[in-house]
Image: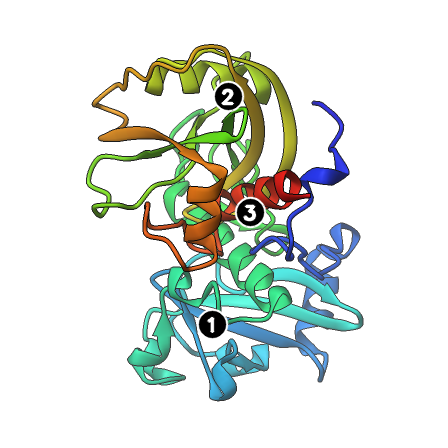
Amino acid sequence: MTEQNSTFAPDTPIPFAGDPLDYAEDKRDGETLQKLIGQTNARAVILHKGKIGIGDGGRPHRIHPSELIGHNLHNPGPVFLGLDGERPIFAASLANPEEFLPEENYVELRGLGGHLPPADLALVGRAKSLFDWHHTHRHCVSCGGQTVGKDGGAKQQCTGCNLESFPRINPVVIMLVTDGDRILLGRGPGWPEGFMSALAGFVSPGETPEEAAMREVEEESGIKTKNPKYMFSQPWPYPSQLMMGIRLEAINTDISIDPKELEEARWFTREDVAAVFEKRGEAFKRPPRSTIAHQIIRAWLGETAA
């Protein structure tokens, strides 16, 4: 992949990135995990149906892992997220959330993106991704047998054939297509009227991210591109994707959208985009700040304004 150009750096920490934890891969045997759970400084964040338990002060509610004993937890039980310095951090998915907090205190992660400190957001994003994976991969892909969590939730093992499986990350490219002082933005089917964002798509087997970016742009908009350059990436826990920002230059500019992928696509000038991001224009509704689309557009604005 192309080396990152420093001029592409985002203006703020990328949401869901910057996880402060040491994943402690060498401390995941059963005996060591029991010692970590028993440490007086250990803490666990709690989830219910993918929602995050929020306590006083608007931050993720933390309890000692021993408080989970006797409660109904979804498999694989407490997951060891890692070490925050000397503090073990766990996460648990609750079947009966009201045993710890009122149900209204469990909040969708999408609604928290702009309100949590970066370290908290990265931590709960990791927890949500892991539990989503465990929930959707309860049977072995080889023999169909039931799987059980191992190594504190870092992997699964089949109870039939013993095959090990590991958390799946889906690679996605999100593309900033430029034509001189213009960028290409689109609106997906069912999106709110006026909401525009960078085009995006999944990387297929056998592709590099750069090749996927060029293919996806042409498929969705009819625009051929060149000179793909990697910008930066973002973990995206919906449910578990890695969003890779790729910048490309347009070869042609006549748009021909695939209606299955886009409802519309348009070119916007730097002035149009700057006005929207500075909240003095209404050419389109900008992507939320928690998204990599917002960040790659903002990085482009900063570069072209320099």
Which comes before the other along the chain, label 3 or label 2? Answer: 2
Asked which secondary structure carries label 1, the reply is: strand
Residue nearer the viewer, 110 or 263: 263
Residue 184: image quadrant is: top left
Distance from disc 2 to disc 1, alpha carbons, whole Å, reads 37 Å
Residue nearer the viewer, 29 or 229: 229
Crowd band around label 3 with a 10 angstrom C-alpha radius: few (<14), some (14–19), many (20+) = many
Distance from disc 3 to disc 2, alpha carbons, whole Å, reads 19 Å
Residue 273: image quadrant is: top left
Asked which secondary structure carries label 2, the reply is: helix
Residue appearing at x 61%, y 65% in the figure: 118
Residue appearing at x 43%, y 33% in the figure: 140
Q: Is residue 258 left or right of residue 213?
A: left
Q: Which mark is residue 298?
A: 3
Residue 256: image quadrant is: top left
How many marks can you see? 3
Residue 19 in picture, x, y percent from top left: 67, 57
Residue 148 in picture, x, y percent from top left: 49, 47
Please state which of the two labelled residues, at mark 2 or mark 1, is closer to the viewer: 2
Asked which secondary structure carries label 3, the reply is: helix
Amino acid of disc 2: Ala
Crowd band around label 2 with a 10 angstrom C-alpha radius: few (<14), some (14–19), many (20+) = many
Q: Is residue 59 visible?
A: yes
Q: Is residue 43 above or below residue 185?
A: below
Q: Is residue 52 left or right of residue 261?
A: right
Residue appearing at x 45%, y 11% in the figure: 224
Residue 304 in picture, x, y percent from top left: 62, 38
Q: Quadrant of the N terminus?
A: top right
Residue 72 in picture, x, y percent from top left: 38, 71
Q: Label 1 belongs to which residue?
A: 46
Crowd band around label 1 with a 10 angstrom C-alpha radius: few (<14), some (14–19), many (20+) = many
Q: Label 2 belongs to which residue?
A: 213
